[in-house]
Image (cartoon, rainbow, N blue to C red):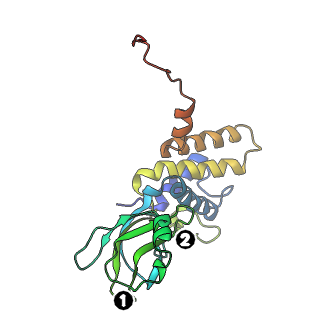
Amino acid sequence: MSIAAQALIRRVVETLQDTTSIRWPVAELVRYLNDGQREIIVHRPDAMVTNASLTLTAGTKQSLPSNGAKLIDVVRNSSGSKRAIRMCAREILDAQSPGWHNLSGVTEIVHFMFDPRDPKVFYVYPPAQSAGASVDLVYSALPTDIAEPAAGTDYSAVSGAISVPDIYSNALQDYVLYRAYTKDSQYAGNEARAQARYAAFANALGIEIKATVAVAPQSVGNPNHQAA
């Protein structure tokens, strides 16, 4: 069950000791919440992993559904024999069959190609027919924004549920508090509070794991192994 955005905002205003929403209007906190959901997807695309069937358009070039952020995999054909689809390097087809984009369309796809620099687009081989070709996709979806309540209202006016899974609710709360404290960073202690909240957010998402591994002490060899 998804956590209500109102419950999350209530925790935030209680932490800020601003339950009447004077210093931090609720609409502002909701904007921070929406930003935080998108920030989570940037660092953890798997947080909004989605499986769906996509009807292909005619030709080789295909696009994710409107709520798609990044392609993760193209698994199989959705109909017919439900043949598995394998990823291949576009350079191979370009070299061996430069005109492959202009081949006759089919309903059963064999390969797909993907460039992470263009995360919402992928190509299929053979080209898809104008009707009848569909595939099962795995992709990262974009979160749905929570509607901003009217000016002057308190947290009880917030409606809807967060889009990211419940396990990210604490990280999302830390992000909202980070943005709130950043707004008042000129006051004593708030800059440190903001940094601490972002650090908690980052640690919860594992953002820092690569940097931690990169600078961790490492043995150049097994000290118990005698050189020959």
Residue 147, label in figure: 2
Which residue is the extreme one toward the bottom?
130
Out of 85 and 99, give the one closest to the viewer. 99
Image check: 76 left or right of 14?
left
Q: Nearer the viewer, residue 70 or 151?
A: 70
Q: Residue furthest left?
A: 81
- Give SS at disc 1: loop
Label 2: which secondary element? loop
Badge 2, how many Cα within 10 Å: few under 14, some, many 20+? some
- Pick the quarter of the image with the N terminus: bottom left
**Amino acid at the residue labelled 1:** Ala
Residue appearing at x 45%, y 83% in the figure: 59
Judging depth in this view, the residue of 118 and 52 nearest the camera is 118
Which numbered mark, 1 or 2, is in the foreground of this view? 1
* Percent x, y of residue 227: 43, 12
Q: Quadrant of residue 74?
A: bottom left
Q: Which mark is residue 131?
A: 1
The label on residue 118 is none
Q: Is residue 78 left or right of residue 88?
A: left
